[in-house]
Image: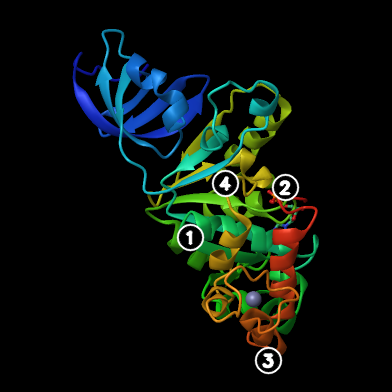
Amino acid sequence: MTDIDLPVGAIYDGLVISAKSGFFTVHTEAGQVICRLRGRIKKKRLEDGFATIGDRVEIQVNEDQSGTINKIYPRSSVIAREAKHTRTRRYKNYNRREEAQLIVANPDQIVLVFACANPSPKPRMLDRYLVVAEANQIPVVICGNKSDLVSQAEAEAIFMPYEDLGYKVLLTSTINGAGITELAELLAGKISAFTGPSGVGKSSLLNAIQPGLGIAVGGVSQATTKGKHTTVHSQMFPLSSSGWIADTPGIRSLALYDMEPDELDAYFVEIAPFVADCEFSDCSHQHEPKCAVKSAVDTGTVSVRRYESYLAMRFGADSLNEEE
Ligand SMILES: Nc1nc2c(ncn2[C@@H]2O[C@H](COP(=O)(O)OP(=O)(O)O)[C@@H](O)[C@H]2O)c(=O)[nH]1
Ligand SMILES: [Mg+2]
Ligand SMILES: [Zn+2]
């Protein structure tokens, strides 16, 4: 289980860095220990949503040098998605929350990677990720990669509106090295979930930061998307600068599974302040008179693009499931 001998019965705090079929690799100061959950935690599994990578846990060492997870410490945040399989094998007592499949616990940030071109950026998808991040109160870094393919002005036109909204934006290129040092600095010492559409250069960015890292992360993603089993193998990879990159294979199908439509108001950061000034408290911001949101769009304070993105997410056919 581990290459060092740990005292039997010893108790350690650790970090879950891999979760697969009920086995958890826990990183502790004494080394890595393969653990299972203690029975009584297992029973609470449906209530608490199990354990996942990023969880801080207390473990106890068994005679065979495996470990038992005694305790999962309270999470500061979690990225979860609707577990599709529970729809076909739904248990009677499942409530909505329990349909969530945990992807990563306690992420310090989500790094959203989009390309300036090839593939062209998808602002609606970016907005959707931002809503999920806002809902979970997880800081976001937006990475506009492949900045070498467009002019500085073009790159800024695409991504700087997000900086104006208060998001951290980096323009990067794995070809000419732009922004790579800055990105590496942002990752140091933190748990980061790297995500974005395929082909935008996520693996290349990780390799630019640390040789081999992109290959490791990308490889696992591929393996996990093949199986249709209920078990999900998720893993975190260590950064030599300290910090972890969470492999988040399921994050692309993130649905806003637990969100009331008008909650969206709060998660569009530039729309939120106007909502209270609408004439009607249940204003849908579409056709009502004296809608402060629409006024803000008319005066250009809220961009038409973001407003349309809001409407699409709230009322569109794709409002609950992500298109890629
Ligand atoms: N021009 C340009 N191409 C890039 C850049 N980063 C990655 N690529 C290319 O984009 C393609 C997809 O990259 P990959 O890292 O596999 O993307 P992933 O699917 O997001 O992991 C590859 O052909 C890379 O060589 C970049 O900064 N500029
Ligand atoms: Mg990749
Ligand atoms: Zn309104």
Q: Is mark 3 within 8 Å of ligand 3?
A: no
Task: Calculate the distance from the C-alpha at mark 2 to the C-alpha at mark 4.
Answer: 12 Å
The local secondary structure at tag 4 comes to loop
Task: Calculate the distance from the C-alpha at mark 2 to the C-alpha at mark 1.
Answer: 32 Å
Per the image, the residue denoted by label 2 is 321
Residue 250 at what x, y percent from top left?
63, 39
Which numbered disc, 2 or 1, marks the residue that appears first in the sequence?
1
The local secondary structure at tag 2 comes to loop
- In the rendered view, does 16 fall on the left or right side of 293? left
The local secondary structure at tag 1 comes to helix
- In the rendered view, does 28 fall on the left or right side of 151? left
Per the image, the residue denoted by label 4 is 258
Per the image, the residue denoted by label 1 is 184
Q: Nearer the viewer, mark 4 or mark 1?
A: 4
Task: Calculate the distance from the C-alpha at mark 3 to the C-alpha at mark 2.
Answer: 31 Å
Front residue of this view, candidates 52 and 18: 52
Residue type for callout 1: Ala
| Residue name at image x 78 percent, y 66 percent | 117
Q: Nearer the viewer, mark 2 or mark 1?
A: 2
Per the image, the residue denoted by label 3 is 299
Residue type for callout 4: Asp
Task: Calculate the distance from the C-alpha at mark 3 to the C-alpha at mark 1.
Answer: 39 Å
Which numbered disc, 4 or 1, marks the residue that appears first in the sequence?
1
Q: Residue furthest top?
A: 63
**Does 152 sit above or below residue 222?**
below
Task: Calculate the distance from the C-alpha at mark 4 to the C-alpha at mark 3.
Answer: 33 Å
